[in-house]
Image (cartoon, helix red, strand yellow):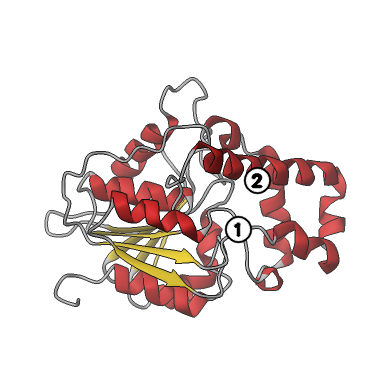
Amino acid sequence: MKMRYDVTGEGPTLMLVHGVVHRRQAWNPVLDLLTPYRRVVTVDLLGHGESPAIDPSLPNPLGHVVDCLDELLGEFETPESKVHVAGNSLGGWLALALACRGRVASATALSPAGFFVNELDKHRTIGTFRLLRSLARGMGTRAPQLLSHKAIRYPAISAFFAHPSRVPYDDAVVDTASLVSNTFVDEGLDAIFELPVAAEPRVPITIAWGQRDLVLPIYQKAVARRNLPHARFITVPGVGHVPMSDNPELIASILLAGSESPTQR
């Protein structure tokens, strides 16, 4: 199933994968910092942005999304070089799944999903998304008008961003509408986040966690470390769950370092 994507820049290919209820434009704050050094592919996941909806009858929606990303990689890889991949939240987990399959040159995950400490922790995360969606639905058709007021907009998006003032108004409106309409919140969040058995355990992996992440708190990093002991772990100060607008320069530097070729490391 074809997913909507954009390609810009020159250099080794780096595919960027957004989180749940987001879209490929989530990477805009870091794009101009990456494109002088990477050919960047930003993709809308199934059920998000301009990509087709995901089939609700699928028994394993996450596995299907991984398969579709795997297929998309084939459009950009060559016999000589694989694609680097990076993702945030759900996109971070998907990047790690592709690394475990051995399908990528490297994987960088920003606050990846799927490393809950227990079932209560998982339900807390799912409940956070559903509560935020209920609040967004409560705004109804008045959402664009209400979000024009900083006193409403900043608290409305503060669960995702450490610095909501850095998120443009238009982005806040679109993201709020996506939170209301996106069906993956129901179909995908209850899925089992089980990484494939690593086919290439030495694929370079970087996992960076925002110190101010309120959606997937940094304590989940301990679970990720147990699952992926060979990964490089970074604690990122001053950023939240979606860190690209919180500190574009720092996040771009993490993405560039994570996608260096072995000879550059």
Query: In what element is the residue under mark 1?
Result: loop
Q: Position of residue 118 (x, y in %)?
A: 47, 40
Mark 2 or mark 1: whose residue is earlier in sequence: 2
Disc 1 residue type (three-letter): Leu
Q: Position of residue 48 (x, y in %)?
A: 55, 43
Relative side of 61 to 187, left or right? left
Q: Is residue 134 above or below residue 80?
A: above
What's the residue at 78%, 45% (across, down)? 135
Q: Camera-side residue: 224 or 84?
A: 224
Query: In what element is the residue under mark 2?
Result: helix
Where is residue 152, by image quadrant?
Answer: bottom right
Considering the image in quadrants, where does the C terminus appear? bottom left
Q: Is residue 149 visible?
A: no
Cα distance, mark 2 to mark 1?
A: 9 Å
Relative side of 111 to 132, left or right? left
Relative side of 134 to 25, left or right? right
For disc 1, the neighbor class at 10 Å (few under 14, some 14 to 19, many from 20) is some
Q: Position of residue 27 (x, y in %)?
A: 50, 63
Label 1 belongs to which residue? Answer: 214
